[in-house]
Image (cartoon, grey):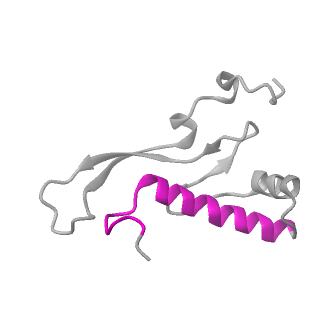
Amino acid sequence: MEYSGGGAPTFPHAADYSLTIAYLKAIEAAGTDNADAVREELGKMKIDDFFAKGGYIREDGLLIHDMYLLKVKQGAEDPWDVADVSRTISGEDAFFSLEDGGCGLVSQ
């Protein structure tokens, strides 16, 4: 079944795949699908896949992972090969700090 009309997968497709695999691994590690147990396992895990390099879930629930600055390719032969990674930005630099997040659930 074709969901994207034959187009290249998008950022949300990649994110959804990554989060589904992480969730299923957390269920397996917890030995249950109890939400609290699964969330605890997610907090312990490294999420290091094609989407979330060096990823982990911070105390405030934010997924911290590397981000990329892309440069569009001109005239690529493959219609899905449209960009090159120009720079990798570490997750710690790409997202706001825990202190700046303002999450009321985080003890500061």
Q: Position of residue 72 (x, y in %)?
A: 23, 49
Q: In the visual, does 108 lie left or right of 72?
A: right
How far from the left and from the top, in percent, is residue 49?
55, 63
- Is residue 24 located in the magenta-colored stretch of the structure? yes
Q: Residue furthest bottom?
A: 1
Quarter of the image that includes the C terminus: top right
Residue at 58% from the left image edge and 29% from the top image edge = 96
Against 30, residue 65 (above or below) is: above
Predominant SS along the magenta part: helix
Q: Is residue 6 left or right of residue 103?
A: left
Q: Is residue 40 visible?
A: yes
Q: Position of residue 1 (x, y in %)?
A: 44, 77
In the image, taking residue 55 as reference, residue 106 lies left or right, namely right
State which quadrant residue 92 falls in. top right
Q: Residue at x 62, y 58 (%)?
A: 19
Magenta stretch bounds:
3-30
Residue that appears at 22% across and 65% down: 79
In the image, residue 62 lies in the stretch drawn in magenta: no
**Where on the picture, by quarter, is residue 26?**
bottom right
In the depicted structure, whether residue 16 falls above or below residue 29:
above
Q: Quadrant of residue 58?
A: top right
Report the residue at 83% width, 53% height from top.
40
